[in-house]
Image (cartoon, rainbow, N blue to C red):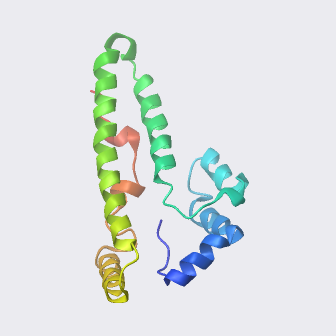
Amino acid sequence: MPYPAQSREKWNELSKNKTEVQKILQELFGNEWPQFTCGVTRDFDKEGLIQMPGQGAAMGLEDAETLSHTLSYPQFLSDYKRLLRIWQNHRKERLVLVKNLTDISGRLRLPDSALVQYANEWVIWGNMKWTGLMGNMQWLDRYNAEGVLKLY
């Protein structure tokens, strides 16, 4: 999610302040997403928040959305094998993209010498300056199942 750069100490401090994390999530996603998702940012047990990307949960929600989109296709009953194969291939492709991104992000954030970590932070900062706060990540954050899952 787009959020101003912080020092490692500030990120660690923020990860321990569950109320602040919940507030940030509500500010970023509390009004723009479907009502169910808005409710999750408002009503979940904030003590369950942990410091991790959370991408697995997001992929699960995408799976549910894209599968329901596929199941609702008018010719699903007569053409279910082909449609489920399209859905499966689409999800595999997206999973590979997300996993590769997660692996790269994880490697960039691994503890290293101060000099290497400093260089990594500058690379990340430079990328965000060049591509904007979303960092050319619209493919990840602006995913629209109905727009990209071509069933016909």
Q: Quadrant of residue 41?
A: bottom right
Q: Residue at x 28, y 42 (%)?
A: 93
Residue 58 in picture, x, y percent from top left: 48, 48
Q: Quadrant of residue 79?
A: top left
- Left or right: 30, with 93 as reference point: right
- Left or right: 126, with 143 as reference point: left
Q: Quadrant of the C terminus?
A: top left
133 versus 35 height, above or below: below
Q: Residue at x 33, y 60 (%)?
A: 103
- Left or right: 1, with 91 as reference point: right
42 versus 120 height, above or below: above
Residue lying furthest bottom = 115
Depth order, front residue of 26/104: 104
Q: Residue at x 65, y 72 (%)?
A: 16
Residue lying furthest top = 78
Residue 139 in picture, x, y percent from top left: 33, 55
Q: Residue at x 35, y 85 (%)?
A: 113
Residue 44 in picture, x, y percent from top left: 70, 52
125 versus 146 height, above or below: below
Total numbered labels placed on residues in the image: 0
Depth order, front residue of 74/84: 84
